[in-house]
Amino acid sequence: MPTSTPLTADELHRINAWWRACNYLSVGMIYLRDNPLLREPLRIEHVKHRLLGHWGASPALSFVWAHLNRVIKRDDLDVIFIAGPGHGAPGVLGPVYLEGTYSEVYPDKSEDEEGLQKFFKQFSFPGHIGSHVTPETPGSIHEGGELGYSLSHAYGACLDNPDLIVACVVGDGEAETGPLATAWHSNKFINPIRDGAVLPILNLNGYKIANPTILARISHEELEALFRGYGYTPYFVEGDDPDTMHQRMAATLETAIAEIHAVQQQARTSGVAERPRWPMIVLRSPKGWTGPKEVNGHKTEGSWRSHQVPFSDVRDNPAHLQLLQDLVAELSPGGTL
Ligand SMILES: Cc1ncc(C[n+]2csc(CCOP(=O)(O)OP(=O)(O)O)c2C)c(N)n1
Ligand SMILES: [Mg+2]
């Protein structure tokens, strides 16, 4: 039976450091063209001329990725990741780079200062990679530009693939599109003997660009009833304190994966494929988590202002250059560089 605090103090420290390093990489991709390890204080020539990308979605994507990696490595699971809010490509590219896969596929983006500089600079840069999850992203089968199809792709990927678990992060804005709103029902087509499983992870960060989302504004009871009605058991991971959230996510993932395995084992040993109730996770976390709390006196972390680039004018405004300097220093895994 999974415990409510499955991470030891050391595991908690390491998973949080890994996640913060991912968030550092996200900020680097969006802002930096040089000085990727902040060997010297930031100057304007280190900052990109055009700031593009989506910070808001990125930390939650990396958070899920970090937790999946823990159980994949520990239990030798076959898991693929689909990013519904694929506009948050930094949240996928960061972990892919940090775990070494990116450098394996693109050796010039090596795991050293020179490779990191290229990795940052190429992001959303003419002639290089897009700011959304594109087909060039290692491990991705889902293009992140047009919202709405992540869950259908996830269910398609697990058909006739009995050992596969497809972890699919769904944005709360994306969930308002017609294709996504109907795709929850794809669980009715899954045969627990022949097919693999999908683990939907709904990221309730409250906003779609500048607007509030419906699923984040209805009551807990209504949301839970909605997903039960769709045939899921929803597990809630809610909050903003990283240590608490890491423990909750680790415990919930263990529960969800154990349930998937139990359903499959029961069906596969009995030979009877009844339609089970599949687990899903509702991750209610701040938009732009770990980013600047306020910019120019306006709430930014946990707000729609985090959606894209949380503050711009960095090359022209010394106060914003300082904000960037503080942010990267704060996010660096050791706290200082
Ligand atoms: C079909 C479609 N409509 C509109 C957009 C424009 N768009 C880009 S990001 C975004 C908001 C997405 O919100 P959400 O899914 O909650 O992701 P978040 O950034 O909050 O993580 C929208 C509407 C799009 N990419 N695709
Ligand atoms: Mg959202």
Image: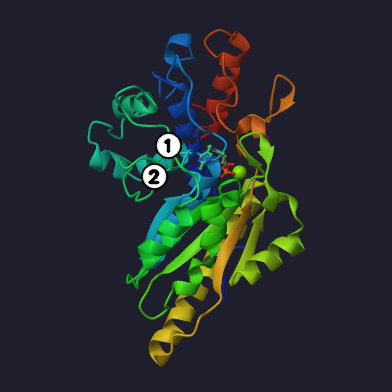
Going by the numbered disc 1, the residue's amino acid type is: His
Q: Are marks 2 and 1 in contact (CB under 8 Å)?
A: yes
Residue annotated with mark 1: 132
- Residue at x-position 46% and y-position 53%: 150
Dividing the picture into quadrants, the one containing residue 138 is: top left
Percent x, y of residue 337: 48, 26
Residue annotated with mark 2: 143
Beta carbon of the mark 2 residue lies under 8 A of ligand 1: no
Q: Is residue 54 left or right of residue 223?
A: left
Crowd band around label 1 with a 10 angstrom C-alpha radius: few (<14), some (14–19), many (20+): many
Q: Secondary structure at mark 2?
A: loop
Percent x, y of residue 42: 49, 15
Q: Is residue 189 left or right of residue 290?
A: left
Q: Secondary structure at mark 1?
A: loop
- Residue farthest to the front, as pictured: 178
Dividing the picture into quadrants, the one containing residue 158 is: bottom left
